[in-house]
Image: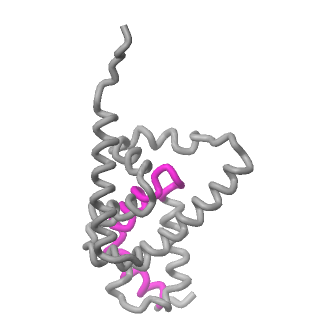
Amino acid sequence: MSKDKQAHFLLLYEPVHDRFERFCRARSYGEMDFKDLINDSLLIAFERFETLRSEQAFLSFLFGISVRIISNHQRKKSEVAHSDEHGSIADTAQEIFADGHFLHLALAQLPAAQKESIILFEISGFRIKEIAEIQSVSEDAVKQRLKRGRERLQEILTYVAKPHTNTSH
């Protein structure tokens, strides 16, 4: 391992660490441990560091890697689910009581593309143009995902906030 490569990598990573961690926490909720996602993403990013075309794109580079890791994890998880019909929620039981747990639960119910767009825009602060590049779609597609995702989040959170009443007497 080259000390220069490591130093350069850390120089680019340190200023974006907080944003990257927030993204990983939000994006991985209910799927996998965010720390595992961060570690796996950083390992791959370091291994492929030479492929980075622009230092300004470093955070996008990390996001792209983490999105692919989540996709692979979901694919593997669905393959396991088909062979084992009994899923376990024990891994996420402690996370349910974390800050913003209703928001995370609501986000988990969104389609992956909408969820990712909302996290990138609302939580990580990316511009629509940047999100379009990360997701390899048009800016209009990102706007539509944000609009539909917000609408669905509002429906979910409104339902969660309403007291459930028994209408049968």
**Which residues are drawn in magenta?**
5-34
Determine which quarter of the picture holds residue 124. Answer: bottom left
Q: Quadrant of the C terminus?
A: top left
Question: Number of numbered discs present?
Answer: 0
Q: Quadrant of the N terminus?
A: bottom right
Q: On screen, 64 above or below 112?
A: below
Residue 30 lies in the magenta stretch:
yes
Q: On screen, 92 above or below 65?
A: above
Direction from residue 40 to residue 148 in the image, left or right: left
Write the residue at 34% across / 46% down: 103
Residue 110, position as x, y percentages in the image:
41, 52
**Depth check: 30 or 1 in front?**
30
Q: Residue furthest front?
A: 168
Residue 2, position as x, y percentages in the image:
53, 90
Determine which quarter of the picture holds residue 133. Answer: bottom left
Residue 48 lies in the magenta stretch:
no
Write the residue at 32% across / 48% down: 153
Write the residue at 38% across / 60% down: 114
Residue 58, position as x, y percentages in the image:
38, 81
Residue 31, position as x, y percentages in the image:
52, 53
**Depth check: 121 or 158 in front?**
158
**Depth check: 33 or 84 in front?**
84
Write the residue at 29% across / 72% down: 140
Q: How is the image coloured?
A: one colour
Q: Residue furthest right?
A: 83
Direction from residue 36 to residue 88 in the image, left or right: right
Q: On screen, 117 above or below 86?
A: below
